[in-house]
């Protein structure tokens, strides 16, 4: 028997699924409104987990199998969020993932990574060498980047993102993040990132998590929460929005993420 809170969650997920179907149909068949963008808006592609351009794409999966996978990961995520605390250590994902990835390039060697977009967490992190387990390559190695610096809180910077307020806490000497059945361990650093069309947006000195041990098979996660350590705050933006089209079309390549003040 399902507990009442699980029944409520299942009903909520079904309602959200119906809403997503309606929105998807409207986006494909209805009129489209071009968002208002300015020169400070970061616009980047979103890659759907099950699309043909995803590193996780499995052409043998049926629509039924994809739907079951999505439902199971949504339930897992929902149950996790019902018990989530406000500490940074339990902010990110449970073991199984789906959704959308953001392509980015990190360091002076511009190592390409595909990080999961997560609207419920705040930290940008990627797997780094030396890495304790097998993860999707290429794995970023900070020792080969001339821009990389270990982030320390020994001094006081004017824009020190580690000086957080509220319930979110993180130690700047290290990064030890646990979430659901997964974990990510490493340190904080500063690095140069490139995002957007043709890698056109170059952002220097972003504080991020450099994970040397993780049991999630991914490059990393882009948390879109609005706290000082989040990518959005460091980019000096106040909003984000995303546009999602026909998810049933594995070749659809126009899902987008916009970060800025007028999006």
Image (cartoon, helix red, strand yellow):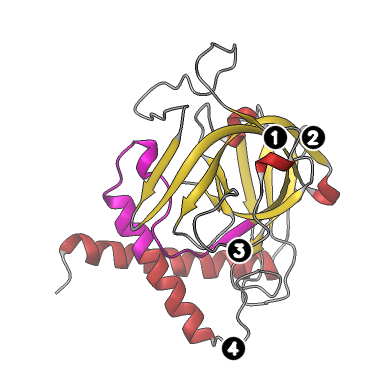
The residue positioned 72% from the left and 71% from the top of the image is 252
Give coordinates of residue 171: x percent, y percent. Answer: 42, 28
Residue linked to disc 4: 60
Tag nearer the camera, 2 or 4: 4
Is 96 placed above or below 224 here?
A: below
Residue linked to disc 1: 262
- Say whether residue 87 is magenta: yes
Label 3 packing within 10 angstroms: few (<14), some (14-19), many (20+)? some
Element type where label 1 sits in the image: loop
Give the residues in magenta: 76-101
The residue positioned 15% from the left and 65% from the top of the image is 3
Structural distance between the alpha carbons of marks 1 and 3: 35 Å
Residue linked to disc 2: 38
CB contact under 8 Å: marks 4 and 1: no
Structural distance between the alpha carbons of marks 1 and 2: 7 Å
Quarter of the image with the C terminus in it:
top right
Give coordinates of residue 92: x percent, y percent. Answer: 43, 48
Element type where label 4 sits in the image: loop
With 131 as the anchor, is 14 left or right in this view?
left
Compare marks 4 and 3 and give the one earlier in the sequence: 4
Q: Residue 131 or 260: which is nearer the viewer? A: 131
Compare marks 2 and 3 and give the one earlier in the sequence: 2
Structural distance between the alpha carbons of marks 4 and 1: 41 Å
Is 149 placed above or below 121 here?
A: above
Structural distance between the alpha carbons of marks 2 and 3: 35 Å
Quadrant of the image occupied by residue 230: top right
CB contact under 8 Å: marks 1 and 2: yes
Label 4 packing within 10 angstroms: few (<14), some (14-19), many (20+)? few
Is 254 placed above or below 224 here?
A: below
Decide if residue 121 is in sight here.
Answer: no
């Amino acid at each position: 028997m399902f507990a009442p809170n699980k029944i409520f969650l299942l009903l909520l997920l079904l309602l959200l699924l119906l809403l997503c179907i309606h929105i998807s149909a409207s986006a494909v068949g209805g009129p489209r409104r071009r968002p208002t963008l300015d020169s400070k808006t970061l616009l980047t592609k979103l890659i759907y987990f099950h699309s043909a351009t995803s590193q996780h794409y499995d052409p043998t999966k049926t629509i039924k199998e994809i739907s079951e996978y999505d439902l199971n990961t949504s339930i897992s995520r929902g149950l996790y969020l019902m018990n989530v605390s406000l500490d940074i250590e339990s902010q990110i994902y449970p073991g199984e993932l789906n959704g959308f990835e953001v392509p980015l390039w990190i360091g002076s060697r511009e190592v390409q990574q595909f990080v999961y977009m997560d609207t419920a967490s705040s930290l940008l992190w990627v797997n780094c060498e030396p890495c304790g387990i097998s993860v999707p390559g290429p794995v970023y190695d900070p020792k080969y980047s001339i821009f990389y610096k270990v982030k320390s809180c020994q001094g006081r910077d004017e824009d020190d993102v580690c000086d957080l307020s509220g319930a979110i806490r993180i130690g700047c000497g290290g990064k030890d993040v646990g979430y659901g059945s997964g974990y990510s361990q490493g340190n904080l650093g500063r690095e140069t990132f490139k995002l957007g069309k043709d890698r056109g947006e170059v952002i220097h000195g972003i504080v991020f998590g450099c994970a040397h041990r993780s049991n999630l098979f991914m490059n990393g996660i882009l948390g879109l929460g609005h706290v000082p350590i989040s990518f959005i705050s460091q980019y000096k933006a106040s909003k984000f929005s995303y546009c999602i089209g026909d998810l049933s079309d594995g070749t659809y390549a126009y899902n987008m993420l916009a970060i800025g003040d007028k999006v």
